[in-house]
């Protein structure tokens, strides 16, 4: 599969994000692929709730009587994306060697799951983009870094899915293109030039 050509650099990139046990390389069935996609969908939905509650005081120490720490939404956001990255990396590694499916019904299930993932993940990313103007400069870097790692994993995973479903590859490719656009905007929104809150650069 052509996505395996970019597997190694992606795994190397994520080595600092998670310490994973050795993963057995194997072909995955369509049902297993759907299960993995659905897991990432659920992770994205849960993270969307955290992102929606993100506020300017996230992670900022509070001063005054009874002082403590601000809410931890910011770090939870980072950790949530790392969880998605870990799931995606495991899936990419396991998919190495998977041949295109020949059962059109099974292919359609995979494509439907991927299409649903794109919708849910775009919703998450749009929420995150909308919150970028709330964060101080010191917070932008870590978010941008994890989004870049996410972008690499999602891109590789999507190529693997597309290679596996010739019956509906065109639709999956179109979905990937839409997601790529939103991911790019999310990364841009958390870079200094794109974080003005006015979409002047992103």
Image (cartoon, rainbow, N blue to C red):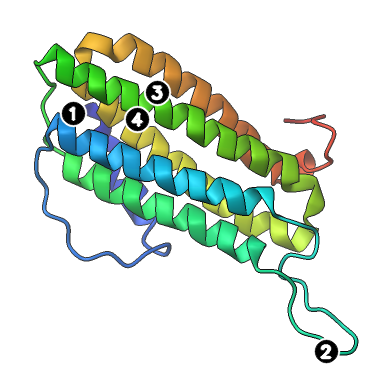
Which image quarter: residue 115?
top left
Q: 189 above or below 16?
A: above
Residue labelled with disc 2: 66
The residue drawn where x is 35% and y is 18% is 172
Q: What is the quadrant of the N terminus in the image?
A: top left
Single out the mark in the foreground, 1 or 4. Answer: 4
The residue drawn where x is 84% and y is 41% is 196
Name the N-terminal-most of marks 3 and 2.
Answer: 2
- Report how far apart the C-alphas of labels 3 and 1 lie in the structure: 21 Å
The residue drawn where x is 69% and y is 53% is 53
Residue labelled with disc 3: 115
Task: Where is residue 76? Give x, y as percent.
Answer: 57, 62
The residue drawn where x is 58% and y is 29% is 182
Nearest the eye: 119 or 192: 119
Residue 74: give its label.
none
Element at label 3: helix
* Circle 1 residues within 10 Å: few <14, some 14–19, many ≥20: some
Q: Is residue 39 left or right of residue 192?
A: left
Q: Residue 144: in sight, yes or no?
A: no
Residue labelled with disc 4: 158
Name the N-terminal-most of marks 1 and 4.
Answer: 1
Single out the mark in the foreground, 2 or 4. Answer: 2
Single out the mark in the foreground, 4 or 3. Answer: 3
Name the N-terminal-most of marks 4 and 3.
Answer: 3
Q: What is the quadrant of the C terminus in the image?
A: top right
Nearest the eye: 157 or 106: 106
Element at label 4: helix
Q: Are marks 2 and 4 in contact (CB under 8 Å)?
A: no
Name the N-terminal-most of marks 2 and 1.
Answer: 1
* Circle 4 residues within 10 Å: few <14, some 14–19, many ≥20: many
Residue labelled with disc 1: 1
Single out the mark in the foreground, 2 or 1. Answer: 2
């Amino acid at each position: 599969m052509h996505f395996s050509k970019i597997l190694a650099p992606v795994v190397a990139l994520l080595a600092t994000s998670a310490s994973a046990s050795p993963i057995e390389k194997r072909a995955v069935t369509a049902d297993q692929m759907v299960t993995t996609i659905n897991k990432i969908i659920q992770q994205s939905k849960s993270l969307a709730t955290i992102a929606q509650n993100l506020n300017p005081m996230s992670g900022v120490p509070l001063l005054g009587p009874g002082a403590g720490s601000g809410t931890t939404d910011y770090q939870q956001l980072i950790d949530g994306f790392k969880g998605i990255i870990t799931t995606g990396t495991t899936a990419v590694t396991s998919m190495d060697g998977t041949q295109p499916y020949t059962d059109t019904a099974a292919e359609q299930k995979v494509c439907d799951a991927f299409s649903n993932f794109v919708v849910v993940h775009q919703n998450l990313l749009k929420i995150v983009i909308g919150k970028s103007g709330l964060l101080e400069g010191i917070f932008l870097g870590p978010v941008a870094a994890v989004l870049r790692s996410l972008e690499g994993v999602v891109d590789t995973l999507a190529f693997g899915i597309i290679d596996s479903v010739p019956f509906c590859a065109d639709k999956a490719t179109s979905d990937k293109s839409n997601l790529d656009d939103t991911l790019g905007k999310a990364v841009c929104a958390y870079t200094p030039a794109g974080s003005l809150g006015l979409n002047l650069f992103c």
